[in-house]
Amino acid sequence: MRVRHEPFDLSHELAQAAGLRCYVDTGATLFACHDGMRLLSACRNAEVRVIGVEGFDIIDGQRRPDMTAILDLSNVEDPTDSVEDAQGFVAEVCRPGLFLEFDLERSF
């Protein structure tokens, strides 16, 4: 896993603007749980909609999905509601060693 400096996707762009650390692993921008909550605050401020969240463990240098840490918010149209739902989810599933990937969409 390596730290990425140039913008990779919307979550990475927001992380850079908020001064958050993120990791890139085979095309996925990942956040430690505490930074995931801070990213969601940045989403709220930028009126960005959260479409989904997926949790991963890094085991022997490889990303492994945590099937108990998956949230689908594709049916939530309001950006504020999606952020609130994602914050509740992240608070519930976070634990040491869990990394989160966020699927985000700009609201217009």
Image (cartoon, grey):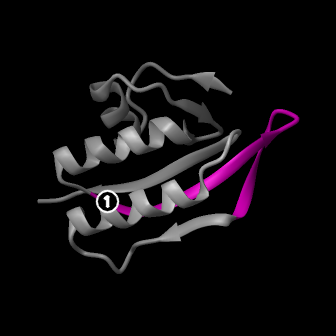
Give the residue at x 50% y 55%: 90
| Front-lying residue, 34 or 58 | 34
Mark 1 neighbour class, 10 Å CA radius: few under 14, some 14 to 19, many 20 or more: many
- Above or below, 11 against 72 in this view is above
| Front-lying residue, 107 or 45 | 45
Q: Quadrant of the C terminus?
A: bottom left
| Residue 34 pos. (x, y %) | 50, 37
- Above or below, 94 against 92 in this view is above
Q: In this view, does 67 lie to the left or right of 104?
A: right
Numbered range of the magenta stretch: 49-67
Q: Name the residue under label 1.
A: 83
| Residue 76 pos. (x, y %) | 31, 76
- In the displayed image of the protein, which residue is found farthest to the left? 108
- Above or below, 65 against 67 in this view is above
> For residue 57: magenta?
yes
| Quarter holding residue 84 | bottom left
Secondary structure category for the residue under label 1:
helix
Give the residue at x 58% y 33%: 24
Type of amino acid under label 1:
Val
Q: In this view, does 87 lie to the left or right of 68?
A: left
